[in-house]
Image: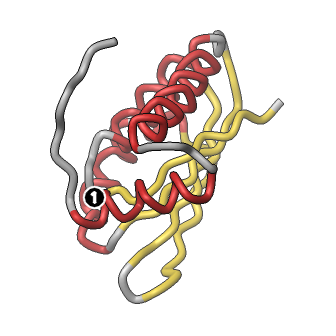
Amino acid sequence: MKIISFSLSDKNLKDMETIQASWGLSNKSEVVRAGLREALQKVEEEKQLQGKICALIILQHSHETEKFVSDVKHEFIKLIKSQNHAEVEEDYCIDVFLLKGNADEIKKMKNALGNNRKIKKIEMVLLK
């Protein structure tokens, strides 16, 4: 097994400890391995998406990312059938995009949105 090192903020470390306790994991390495398994499962599920699909992208973000979200939205405007924006708290918003189109293009939009560190959470839900 390889040993690697990486840096975490104090909040990330606290979050890691919360996950460790909640999931009953024996150490922080197990938290990282469990997180990797979860992420890999999502990657594998997304690989299966092909052809025309219908999906939701649900996005939680701060007000400071509004321009970024708008820019990505305009880049993928042909996929968007509907969008709902709500200010949930004074420091964050939720956007829900209903998308229909080529699976690869929808995945590109999700990745474009998710690659910004200031996006707090992003989920894609496949609709059948």
Residue name at image x 49 percent, y 34 percent: 78
Q: Quadrant of the N terminus?
A: top left
Q: Is residue 30 left or right of residue 116?
A: right
Kindly indicate the quadrant of the structure image that contains residue 75: top left
Horizontal and vertical percent position of residue 32: 42, 36
What residue is drawn where x is 47% and y is 86%? 89
**Which residue is more in the foreground, 4 or 70?**
4
At label 1, the amino acid type is Lys
Percent from the top left, x then y, of residue 27?
Answer: 45, 43
> On the rendered image, what quadrant is the C terminus found in?
top right
Q: Residue at x 27, y 47 (%)?
A: 116
Is 64 situated above or below 13?
A: below
Q: Secondary structure at mark 1?
A: loop
In the current view of this chain or complex, which residue is farthest to the front?
Answer: 26
Q: Does residue 127 sit above or below 82 in this rendering?
A: above
Q: Residues within 10 Å of mark 1 (few under 14, many from 20)?
A: some
| Residue at x 60% of width, y 23% of height | 41
The spot of residue 107 in percent (x, y) is 49, 26
Numbered label tally: 1
Q: Is residue 120 above or below residue 127?
A: below
Q: Which residue is mark 1?
A: 118
| Residue 46 placement (x, y as % from top left) | 59, 20
